[in-house]
Image (cartoon, helix red, strand yellow):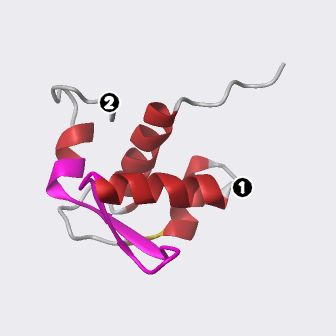
């Protein structure tokens, strides 16, 4: 049986968490390569990652370098969103 795909909100949350983990949970701006994020998420679908990055950048949760992005960093708002116990911890 195939594993169900995560919802867009779950994927965004996973993306933000992966960036946070890969940057050693250091404060922004600490950058990581998108290739490392893709590996951490365990997906071959780079288009989905790029689209999620665009959404997160548009909402102020991430900053990206390049188009398509080659590296990303969380913003303070992005960290607040994934912080344990944060109100509304799931991206909408």
Q: Which mark is residue 12?
A: none
Question: Where does residue 85 sit, x and y in percent of width and height?
Answer: 18, 25
Residue drawn at (80%, 24%), measured in percent from left and top? 2
Crowding at mark 1 (Cα within 10 Å: few <14, some 14-19, many 20+):
few
Q: Is residue 34 left or right of residue 87?
A: right
- Image quadrant in which you'd find residue 31: bottom left
Q: Quadrant of the C terminus?
A: top left
- Image quadrant in which you'd find residue 29: bottom left
Q: Which mark is residue 90?
A: 2
Q: Which residue is mark 1?
A: 44
Residue drawn at (17%, 43%), measured in percent from left and top? 80
**Looking at the image, which residue sits at the far bottom?**
66
| Label 1 secondary element | loop
Residue 75 in magenta stretch: yes
Q: Is residue 88 left or right of residue 45?
A: left
Question: Where does residue 17 sit, x and y in percent of width and height?
Answer: 38, 45
Residue drawn at (31%, 57%), measured in percent from left and top? 58
Crowding at mark 2 (Cα within 10 Å: few <14, some 14-19, many 20+):
few
Query: Front-most of 57 and 26?
Result: 57
**Looking at the image, which residue sits at the far top?**
1
Residue range corresponding to the magenta coloring? 59-78
Q: Is residue 85 left or right of residue 33?
A: left
Query: Front-most of 78 and 25?
Result: 78
- Image quadrant in which you'd find residue 62: bottom left
Residue drawn at (27%, 39%), measured in percent from left and top? 82
Question: Where does residue 34 sit, x and y in percent of width and height?
Answer: 51, 67
Indicate which disc, 1 or 2, sits on the residue closer to the N terminus: 1
Query: Front-most of 41 and 60?
Result: 60
Gap in angstroms between the C-alphas marked 1 and 2: 24 Å
Q: In the picture shown, does residue 38 fall above or below 7?
A: below
| Label 2 secondary element | loop
Question: Where does residue 32 sit, x and y in percent of width and height?
Answer: 41, 70
């Amino acid at each position: 049986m195939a594993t169900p795909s995560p919802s867009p909100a779950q994927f965004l949350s996973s993306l933000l968490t992966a960036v946070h983990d890969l940057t050693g949970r250091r404060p922004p701006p600490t950058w990581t390569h998108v290739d490392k994020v893709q590996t951490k998420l365990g997906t071959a679908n780079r288009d989905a990652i790029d689209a999620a990055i665009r959404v997160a950048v548009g909402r102020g949760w991430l900053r990206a370098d390049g188009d398509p992005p080659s590296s990303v960093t969380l913003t303070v708002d992005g960290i607040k969103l994934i912080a344990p116990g944060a109100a509304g911890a799931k991206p909408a």
